Image (cartoon, helix red, strand yellow):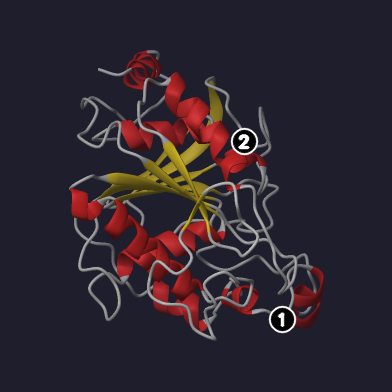
Amino acid sequence: MGMIMRKWLLVLLAGLVATMAWVSPANAADGAPVVDVHGIVGQGAGCTAVDSAKQAAPLQQVLSANGYIGQVVPIDYYCGDSKGVSIRGAGGPSTAEYPQNGYTLNTPIERLGLDLASFVYDTYTVKGQPVNLACYSMGGLICTYALTHLGTPGFPPSLLVQNVVTFSTPFGGVDKSNFGTPEQYKLIWCGNYTQCDQLMPGSPFLTDLAQQSLPAGVDLTTLGGGPNDIMTYAASTTALAQHAVNFYGSLPVKYNHNNMITDTSLAFNMPARVTQRGGGTSQIYNGAHSLNWAAHAFVSSAW
């Protein structure tokens, strides 16, 4: 039984969690590579960039602290990304619409999902290697789109993906309440670009994604709901999720859209509401911090 499992059992024995139990040993995907997919950068249609390796480092730290031997693989897709592994063009040859070296805010999420699925298939699945997915912000939409469209034209037939964790992903769209009118929202936050439009509540992309289903055997955990996260607010989970963790409190950490993927604390003092598909919602008063929750999702075969 792994370190994180023992910690959770101690919490349970202390009576801090009322209705949840983790008693199964680490699953077969323990030690599998964790493909880490970053989110949107609202810098216009020029050559935007994310330091994907820097983003992935805190997750690697927490996984390693829990005895997880798998490596976190940071993914690049924007034209200026250069610190991770590029998936640009993985889904097929470059075109005028999808220039292989020029992905910007105008590159549709659908294309990014296709490239991610193709990359995982060619790099891992055909070799019989299972992987886990860690997906931040819009990255969660890229990951779920990739998985829900397997077998459709252009997509791989299947992927060896077992566990998926999303961090602060706007499945219901970006909360516009603090941005005024839709026009002000576009001007202030992101702009009139394809990905910005797709992140708006009620967009055709989000409407379609909500009607899809995950392949059998894929276990999805969503982490979100931070009280200071205007990107997701109460819409950071989806009906696709088997487990949804809502960090509703402000102490000891007031999660916003950024610190949910940088909190490396291994303490068990975070309040949260955890909803299990078909099993109701449990109130936790001494739960794990965000990245430690993700570690649990990657090493445990049951909740």
Residue 247 in percent (x, y) is at 56, 41
Q: Label 1 sits on what residue type?
A: Asn
Q: Is there any visible trace of residue 286 in the rendered image?
A: no
Answer left or right for 174 relative to 142. right
Is 111 or 16 nearer to us in this picture?
A: 111
Q: Is residue 113 above or below residue 230?
A: below
Label 2 and label 1: CA atoms lie apart by: 29 Å
Q: Residue at x 29, y 73 (%)?
A: 155
Q: Residue at x 58, y 70 (%)?
A: 103
Answer left or right for 28 relative to 190. left
Which quarter of the rendered picture does the N terminus lie within? top left
Residue 303 in percent (x, y) is at 29, 35
Q: In this view, does 236 lie above or below 146?
A: above
Quarter of the figure with residue 174: bottom right
Q: Are marks 2 and 1 in contact (CB under 8 Å)?
A: no
Q: Earlier in the sequence, mark 2 or mark 1?
A: 1
Q: Is mark 2 on a helix, strand or loop?
A: loop
Quarter of the figure with residue 3: top left
Q: Which residue is drawn at 65% across and 53% down?
A: 50
Give the numbered dot on residue 262: 2
Answer left or right for 145 relative to 156. right
Residue 63 in percent (x, y) is at 44, 28
Q: Is mark 1 on a helix, strand or loop?
A: loop
Q: Which residue is tagged 1?
A: 192
Give the numbered dot on residue 116: none
Mark count? 2
The residue carrying pointer 1 sits among few (fewer than 14), some (14 to 19) or many (20 or more) residues within 10 Å by Cα, namely some
Q: Which residue is drawn at 71% across and 74% down?
A: 45
Q: Is residue 26 above or below residue 75?
A: above
Residue 110 in percent (x, y) is at 45, 75
Q: Label 2 sits on what residue type?
A: Thr
- Most extreme residue toward the bottom is 96
